[in-house]
Each structure stands twice: as structure tokens, then as C-alpha cells.
Image (cartoon, rainbow, N blue to C red):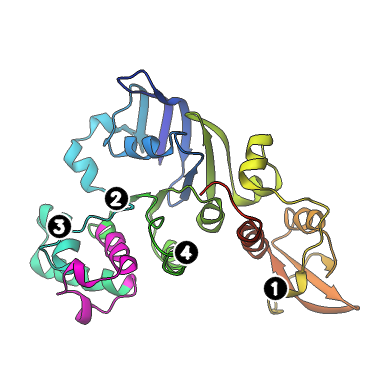
Amino acid sequence: MIKFDKVTKLYDDRTKAVDQLDLHIQENEFFVLIGPSGCGKTTTLKMINRLIDASDGSIFIGDKKITDYNIHELRWNIGYVLQQIALFPHMTIAENIAVVPELKKWSRKQILGRVDELLEMVGLDPAVYRDRKPTELSGGQQQRIGVARALAADPSIILMDEPFSALDPISREKLQNDMLHLKRTINKTIVFVTHDIREALKLGDRICIMKEGKVVQVGTPDDILNKPANPFVRDFVGVHKQDERIDLESLVLPLDASVVLNRLPAKASLAEVLENLSQHDKVLIEKDGKSIGLIDRQRVIEYMASQLDERGCKHE
């Protein structure tokens, strides 16, 4: 879907923000870019819609170089959500969402229907919010409008540049949960920049960890947690000791009719759990000879991400 072929970005002061980047982002994937400050993640994101132009190499959307698109057409077909959402203060919420559809000359009826559809999608009652001004909304509500505006013209690609980092923890967690729901209900390729490894693990289908303008590792949350490529990734993620015991009883999901291919005791180590879940989607957990529930990869990843909260994450 999106391909970087030996892409380099060199600024006027000779700073090399991105260095010979090769990357392939798949269609309908939630792809997270993360790394320390100055690693090149935001530059990489902004090169996709040409807010920043590459110094060398090529970027493709599908089989076409982005430089072969009309730049306005390119940007109209890529939704963009910023940390500071910058809604137009003099316009209503409906008018803010309708900006790109109006530029694309949608009919009035189409636009009104799309505005209401999107407000409902992001959890805001159209009758209550469509005629309000941005100053009447909380920070979390404004970010929801930002997401709705990015989706307004039904683009195939959404770019999100640390969209939740300025929010309070409660609003941030709520919006993360909303994004999890949204990515299951819309078919979009989402490229998401964050500095928070917990957010990356929670949201990403795949995660790209960058350092000094280069890719250090690309993989699923499982890969990043279970098979860090080097000590930098291990330290950045805060990987757990593989022999530690985890409280599986608190993590189990209800039993269902799924075919279960393996069983583990409730006192199994993290290494045992990860090994089994690398081979099977779900594992049956037993205690005192009785089945107490199921556990899956997502449940373990959520647990490991939550442990980063408790232990402290220095990459915020």
C-alpha cells in the first residue's frame, strides 16, 4: 500500500532525519512509528502526504510515486490528525468536518449525511454537537472531531501524529479504546506516530521502532515483546524477564466453544505462555485440575503493556 524505497531526508543544516529508509506498510494495517525524540518518525509520517519532501529515494502509494500525484489530490485523499487538532474556531463542528467534502464538491445532502454518520461513529450525538463551536468542546471531544474530519471524504489512508499525547490520561485511554473499535469497523490504512510504547502495543498491528533515522525493528506486538531485535529494543520496550510468573487467573477469558489446542497451569511462566501462544491462538488455563478460562495473545499483550505503566516507562 505505502512503500518507502531507500528514502532519505536531509535538512538544510545537514541533519539527516531519515537515512535510506526501506519500509512497506500494508493495506488496511494499523502501523505505528515509534522511537526516541529525533529518531525521524514524524518526518517519515509527513513525507507520505508531502508536508515534507524526501531528499532522495521514492515513496509509493500503490504502484504510483507520490510525486506523480497532483499534490492537492494527494492530500485530499489522505486524512491527517495532529496532536493540536487546530479546528477552525469560527466554524461549527459540522462545517469543520465538511471542509474536504466541500472542496471535492460533494452535494449538500451527501455532506450532511456524512457529518451525522461520522459524529455517531466517534461517539458524539449529531443533534447535540453539529452546530456547536470548537471552544464549546473538551480536548477529548475536539480530538474526536479531528478524527471525524480526517475520515470525512472517506480516504484510504489516515495519518495520525501523536494525536492523543496532549490529553489527560482518562481521555487518552478512552480515545485509544475508540480507535481500537474504529479500526475494526473501517477499512483504512492508518499510520500512527507515538512516543508511548504502551499506546503502540495497544493499537498497532505492526510496530516500527526507529533510531537515528533508521529502522531498528518492524514487527507485531508479539514480535517486539517476545523477540526484540537487539538490546536497544529490549531496553526501549522494557521487556519482561521470561522466567517470571504472571497472574493468569486475573487474565482469563470465559470458556467458549472454541477448539483448544493446548493447556497450561495457572502458575505458568511468561516464557511458557508466550511459547504456547506463538503456536496456538488460544490456550486453556487450568487450576487444581479444573479449567478456569481461556487466554489469548491480545490479553497477554495488554497485560505486558499495563506492567510498563507500573514499572515506569522512560520514553514518554
Whether residue 174 appears in magenta in the rendering, the answer is no
Residue type, numbered disc 2:
Tyr
Identify residue for label 4. Answer: 180
What's under tag 3, amino acid-wise?
A: Val
Q: Is residue 148 above or below residue 34?
A: below
Query: Answer yes or no: do the residues labelled 1 and 2 have beta carbons within 8 Å?
Result: no
Label annotation for residue 289 = none
3 or 1: mark nearer the eye: 3
Residue 224 drawn at (x, y percent): 63, 45
Q: Mark 3 or mark 4: which comes first in sequence?
A: 3
Q: Nearer the viewer, mark 1 or mark 4?
A: 4
First of labels 3, 1 by sequence position: 3
Quadrant of the rendered structure where residue 175 is? bottom left
Q: CA distance from mark 1 to mark 4?
A: 23 Å
Provide the residue designation for mark 1.
258
Per the rendered image, the range of residues in magenta is 121-149
Measured in 3D between alpha carbons, the distance from the residue under mark 3 to the one under mark 4, in whole angstroms, is 26 Å
Tags 3 and 4 touching, CB below 8 Å: no
Give the answer, above or below, for where 224 lies relative to 282. Answer: above
The answer for how far apart the CA atoms under marks 4 and 2 are is 18 Å
Q: Name which of mark 3 and mark 2 comes first in the sequence.
A: 2
Q: Amino acid at mark 4?
A: Leu
Q: Is residue 315 above or below residue 153?
A: above
**Helix, strand or loop under label 3:** helix
First-in-chain label (4 vs 2): 2
Q: Indicate the quadrant containing the N terminus: top left, top right, bottom left or bottom right.
A: top left
Task: Name the residue tied to disc 2.
Answer: 80
Q: Is residue 145 left or right of residue 108?
A: right
Q: Give SS at disc 4.
A: helix
